[in-house]
Amino acid sequence: MDYHAFGPYILALVAYAASPGPIMAVLVVRSLGKDWKDTAAFATGLCVAEVIAVLAVLLGIGVWAQSQPHTLALAKYLGVAYLLWLAVQMWSDTSTFTSSRLGKVGWLTSATAGLALSLGNPSTLLMQMLLVPIVAPKGVVSLEHGALVVLATFAAFGLIFYGTIPLARQFNRIISSRQSTGLFNRLTAGVIALTSVWILLV
């Protein structure tokens, strides 16, 4: 087992997690809400989904899933439905971020939403299929090896996803007027709605 390969692997995951995209956009929007516990649960769901994708690749399920796209259809549609629901909530919400009701749906529901959204994103499995060979070019050689891959994956995504929450909440303090909040809500709702369409069509 090459421990040195974990450095480039983690850096690649961090860069991928931090890159702009539908997952990061939704996480930022949820982070602007008042209930940080539900947002943390949502971020946990995102991290767990990445771990599931890694395990699927390590077990060879990733190749099978790519050849059987209907197996991911349920998660994909659930993710799209969640995005559309979120877009409607953002569009109709006229309150400021500090008093927003968005995100108060319970930690279990939030975690499930994060899980479905990430697993429903085609790039989740694809990126793991591309990156996992960095640390497991011949597959998992031992239980310790597999555990390290899983821990490294969770740590890399956790660093970005959990770190995004306090940063977004600081942004919350900058845009606090009702007028600027309403404009931001509608612009974000439009972006999220377009994102849901993109995920549905790819």
Image (spheres, rainbow, N blue to C red):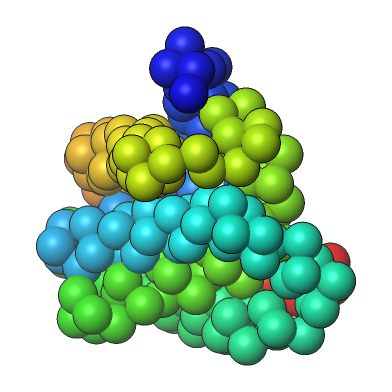
Q: Is residue 173 visible?
A: yes
Q: Residue at x 37, y 46 (%)?
A: 143
- Closest to the observer: 65 or 37? 65
Residue shown at 62% from the left, 54% from the top: 57
Q: Position of residue 150 (x, y in %)?
A: 39, 45
Q: Is residue 174 above or below residue 113?
A: above
Residue 154 x %, y %: 35, 44
Counting from the top left corner in percent of width and height, residue 64 is at 76, 70
- Residue 172 occupies quadrant: top left
Is 164 in front, or is 99?
Answer: 164
Is 114 situated above or below 88? above
In the picture, residue 34 is in which quadrant? bottom left
Q: Is residue 179 left or right of residue 24?
A: left
Please, which residue is most extreme toward the top here?
Answer: 4
Q: Nearer the viewer, residue 111 or 186?
A: 111
Q: Position of residue 13 (x, y in %)?
A: 52, 32
Q: Is residue 134 left or right of residue 141?
A: right
- Residue displayed at 19% across by 75% down: 107
Quadrant location of the C terminus? bottom right
Of residues 109 and 174, which is closer to you in this image? 109
